[in-house]
Structures are given as structure tokens and as C-alpha cells.
Image (cartoon, grey):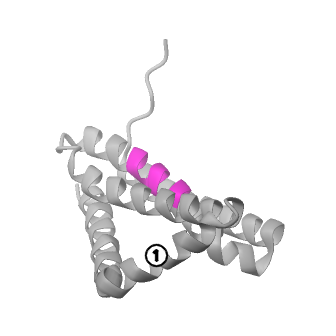
Amino acid sequence: MTQPLAMTRPRYIMRLITIAGLTGLVAAAFYIIWGAQLFSFYGWATAALVGSIMLSRTLYQRYTALGKSRWPRLLFVIPAVIACIVQIVYWLAFFNLGGVGIMLGQARLLILHDVGFVLQPAFIALLLLAAYLIWRGSRV
């Protein structure tokens, strides 16, 4: 049985570049397949879901190699994956449930009216957390 390659700093950086490229490729492929309108509903969430999962795995491997605690990556990946899945499932339900989709749309408007102001700061906080986690993994 072969040992997996250690997650060295150069390997870590190359993996991050690969993740960015693959996430962009997924986004571009979905844009071409679905077109601009459906991409705006599903595409960003799908690409972010793929990128978040790949980033979490890479951070896990890098933190293991450095002997650092691996749980902080969960502070990023769990909210990111939940947000992506909620976005995808909402639009799938909205378009496929007929008359129930109208009620979903109304419920979404009511919820966004009350808590919508939190979404942008939460997104920025999630991006800053991801940047910190990536930086934390790049330190020796």
C-alpha cells in the first residue's frame, strides 16, 4: 500500500490553483449548458458547492501535514455547503412544484424582508474566513 504524498507548501499552493481553475471550469460549463438565466439561479451555488468541498478536503490534508487542528475548516465548509444546497433546492422546488412555487416565492420575500440585510455581511464574513483558513494553511 502506497503512502499518500505529503501536503507540502508548493503542493498546497498548486492544489489551491487547481481548485480555483476547476471551480471556474464548472461555472463556465454550467453557464454554457444552462444559459445565463438558469445559471443565475443554480450556477453560482453549484460552482461554490464544488469549490467549497474541494477546499475543505485540501485544508484537511494540509492541516494534518502541519499538525494543526483540522476543525476550523468546518466553520467555513458547513455554512457554505448549507447555503449552496438551500439555494439549489429552493430554485428546484420553485420551478418544479407548480402552484407551491408561488407560495415559496412569497415566503422567500417575507424572510428576505426581515433578515435579508444579514446576507451580505454573512457572505463577506464567510469569504474572510476562507481567506484566513487558506492563509493559515500556507504558513509553515
Q: Residues within 10 Å of mark 1 (few under 14, many from 20)?
A: few
Q: Amino acid at mark 1?
A: Arg
Residue 77 placement, left or right of 44: left
Residue 55 placement, left or right of 32: left
Against 132, residue 89 (above or below) is: above
In percent of the image, x 38 and y 36: which residue is there? 6
- Element type at mark 1: helix
Circle 1 residue: 108
Q: Position of residue 36 (x, y in %)?
A: 75, 80
Q: Is residue 103 magenta?
A: no
Q: Position of residue 19 (x, y in %)?
A: 54, 58
Q: Is residue 52 magenta?
A: yes
In percent of the image, x 60 and y 74: which residue is there? 102
Against 34, residue 124 (above or below) is: below
- The part of the chain drawn in magenta is 49-58
The part of the image, by quadrant, that contains residue 132 is bottom left
In percent of the image, x 55 and y 66: which residue is there? 45
Magenta stretch, overall SS: helix
